[in-house]
Image: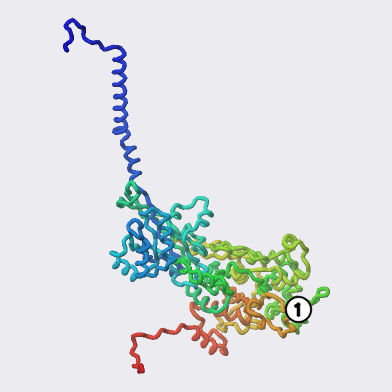
Amino acid sequence: MRRPADTPPPRITRRGLMLLGLQFGVIGALGWRMRDLQILQNEKYRLLAEENRINIRLLPPARGNILDRDGRLLAGNRQNYRIVMVREQAGDPAAVLARLATIIDLPQEARDRVLREMMARSAFVPVVVAEHLSWDDVVRVAANSPVLPGVEPEVGLSRFYPDGPSTAHVVGYVGPVSERDLEKLEDPDPVLQIPRFQIGKTGVEERLEPLLRGHAGNQRIEVSAAGRVMRELGRTEGQSGRDVNLTIDAELQIYAMQRMEGQSAAAVVIDVQNGDIVALASAPGFDPSSFVFGIRSGEWNALLNDEYRPLSNKTVAGTYPPGSTFKMCVALAALETGAARPGDTVFCGGSTSLGKRRFHCWKHGGHGTVDMRRSLSQSCDVFYYEMARRVGPDAISAMAHKLGLGIAHDLPMPAVAAGNMPDAEWKKIHRSEKWTTGDSFNYGIGQGFTLASPLQLAVYAARIAGGRSIAPRLVRAVGGEPVEIPAAEPLAIAPKHLEVVRGGMFAVSNEGTAYRSRFVDPANLMAGKTGTSQVRNITAAERAAGVTRNEQLPWNRRDHALFVAFAPYDNPRYAIAQIVEHGGGGSAAAAPIARDILGFALYGGPAPLSAYPAEQRGAIEAERAAREPQAEPDASAATPARDRA
């Protein structure tokens, strides 16, 4: 219908204009915002989107090597062939694992563990099924890949220890990071979150972990919205851990372990000139690789229940009454305080009285009149009862600390023991009792409350030999850069007094209790001191039953055998401390072993037979032959045919 001709055209009202303006304003604001987002802030939001599309994954660094003083490998890395499985690709993971178990060794408990890990993670995350496989295992798995969906071989790095038990206590071992490990750290390195990442658990591996671990690299990968890996976009390789050279001489270390085979024992050899520890051997050892691969419960229980305590590092953590090896300390305390002079004598009739109690000498008939040199040579107990009575505990304790006893030396090893060199105040605090003369008598012969580790006794012998306050050190270089040797100041002990004690030690090895364990080579004469550390007294009941000698007791109740020494006497190079747990007398059990180990250090190999007394050479040669490993028969050699009938 048409509008009449006289009808005026419609007008736009003010309200209409306002609505129209409001619409144009909204459209303009939206357009400006779109321009802002798409042009002005394009880079910002492009990066945010990129971050949602790209993940950063850490790449574990190669662990630094541990080497001996000459560069021989003590702990290194080798290829680790392993098998992983992705649950979403496997279909029926249990069935695939069952088929895999027919190809490689995969016990049911291992399969159950893999299934639990798979269910705890996303379906596309790889789970380690088995590792430390042989190349033959990997080839068999690859050849059967059509029937093993979701299963893939991989190559990584794992730790290995070429010398096994010989260096286990020094080097230590690595193992997977545990929750307990993470709890000890205030700010854990992100690399520790990598599944199954391994860190040092004991020994140098533990104490030098930050140096050996290195720094992680990273891998940039593209992932789908579900988080599935699509492709690798780039990677930055990590920084390998730093190599560490120890002061240990691997050949000497191995020889020391071989020489102590069958014993519960420890030996420490120190370079008198600079404090380098060239051997730190604790027997028996254990295989550190067992812990890297995952030790089985049976092997673990066997180690825990072994009465020889193979897991204990006796060299630094074991503490024992030092017995008569402590007598040099008491002699020096007496000389330095003026309580005795080198020529002073004491009569030994086999015992001395203190009230109603008698303190006996090891030699029942006594040594007669002895001076300081002969008291050391013959290890006269009565002489040192008297010296300790004159000197008192405080001066003896001060001298012990000066000589390196009663100190937890700073080494990159766990559980380094401080031992105990008590004074009167110590007993008051720890026992709520006053120090008595009887305590001093026990102190004088290295018994009672006195405790020292083999490491401390080696430092003690080295300080007496060199006359300087050398500090033991175990790290020679880091990353190829030599570690500075700390300055060793002269001991605050009169040189003439040190000469008296050294002369007494020379007499021990060449005239006295260690006479059978001497060298006759004039270039390498030894000076030493035997010791017997009493574990317990023979009871009246045992005596009534006929037990009168230490060797008649059960093994774990017998005395410990000790020996400390240095050589060459006129120009000391090495000092040694040797202990044989429950070995009996130091002269019979500890001194022969120590002589052989010290000889290896001096000669750069087993000491020549000419260095031993003539009457012992045949027996030593036979003993060496018995210790030599027997050669395996050559399977390729022709053998006579045998009748199978």
Q: Position of residue 398 (x, y in %)?
A: 69, 64
Amino acid type at image mark 1: His
Q: Quadrant of residue 312?
A: bottom right
The residue under label 1 is 360
| Quadrant hosting residue 301 | bottom right
Tag 1: Cα neighbours inside 10 Å, few (<14), some, or many (≥20)?
Answer: some
Image quadrant in which you'd find residue 510: bottom right
Q: Nearer the viewer, residue 174 or 107?
A: 107
Residue at image location 26% in from the left, 12% down from the top? 12
Between 336 and 145, the residue placed more toward the observer is 145
Left or right: residue 108 compared with residue 617: left
Asked if residue 482 is positioned above or below residue 531 in the image, the reply reads above
Residue 56, image x and y in percent? 37, 49
Location of residue 314 in the rendering, given as x and y in whole percent from the top left corner: 58, 70
The secondary structure type at the circle numbered 1 is strand
| Of residues 554 and 1, the one drawn nearer to the viewer in this rendering | 1
Q: Is residue 5 visible?
A: yes
Residue closest to the eye, 254 or 119 = 119
Residue 339, visible in the rendered structure: no
